[in-house]
Image: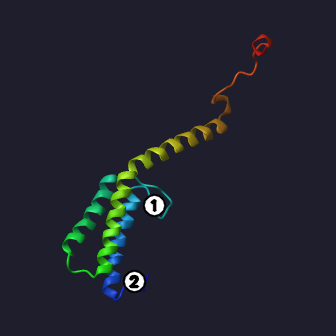
Amino acid sequence: MAEIFHDDETARFFQLVHLFQRSALLQMGQLPDTEGNVHYNMAEAKEAIDLLRMLQNKTKGNLQDIETSLLNGVVSELQLQFMKAPAIHRKRQQEQNQSDAIRDTFANPQKGPVEDLTGSQDEEE
């Protein structure tokens, strides 16, 4: 990525942009934290995106074309992910609930669902 940035100041600017990008993705549940936990805090994600939009507005006209393009791309992608995050979160919750139910069934088989296989001969014919 060093070949994209022409100087250290530009590289540091994008370290800052990346910090906010990573924070937003982490709070939307798109990235796990350092311990592998997934978070879902849309207010915090929105705050990170809003800070990037503020940077976008405050630096307008002061960035090189490549810097502007990269910043705009990051902001646009985060906004798109922000819109998709609730549906992705619901799907993950449903999958986790199903996984928990299966795990519980194997841990406590006597409490799990039962299929009656003792039907009479007349029912089969």
Which residue is under mark 2?
4
Label 1 SS: loop
> Looking at the image, is mark 1 or mark 2 earlier in the sequence?
2
Q: Rate crowding at label 2 as few (under 14), some (14 to 19) or many (20 or more) other CA atoms within 10 Å.
A: few
Q: Rate crowding at label 1 as few (under 14), some (14 to 19) or many (20 or more) other CA atoms within 10 Å.
A: some
Residue 25 drawn at (x, y percent): 40, 61
**Drawn side of residue 38 relative to residue 51, left or right:** right
Identity of the residue drawn at 25% across and 80% down: 63
Of 83 and 113, nearer the camera is 83
Position of residue 48 relative to residue 59, above or below, is: above
Tag 2: amino acid: Ile
Tag 1: amino acid: Leu
Identity of the residue drawn at 67% across and 29% down: 110
Position of the N terminus by quadrant: bottom left
Of 65 and 105, nearer the camera is 65
Residue 70 drawn at (x, y percent): 34, 74
Count of marks overlaid on the render: 2
Label 2 SS: loop
Identity of the residue drawn at 29% across and 80% down: 65
Position of the C terminus by quadrant: top right
Here the colouring is rainbow
Position of residue 115 relative to residue 73, above or below, is: above
Res 79 → quadrant: bottom left
Residue furthest toward the top? Answer: 122
Q: Real-space Cα distance between discs 1 and 2?
A: 25 Å
Residue 68 drawn at (x, y percent): 29, 75
Res 61 → quadrant: bottom left
Position of residue 18 relative to residue 119, above or below, is: below
Residue 91 drawn at (x, y percent): 48, 45
Which residue is under mark 1?
31
**Drawn side of residue 35 relative to residue 81, left or right:** right
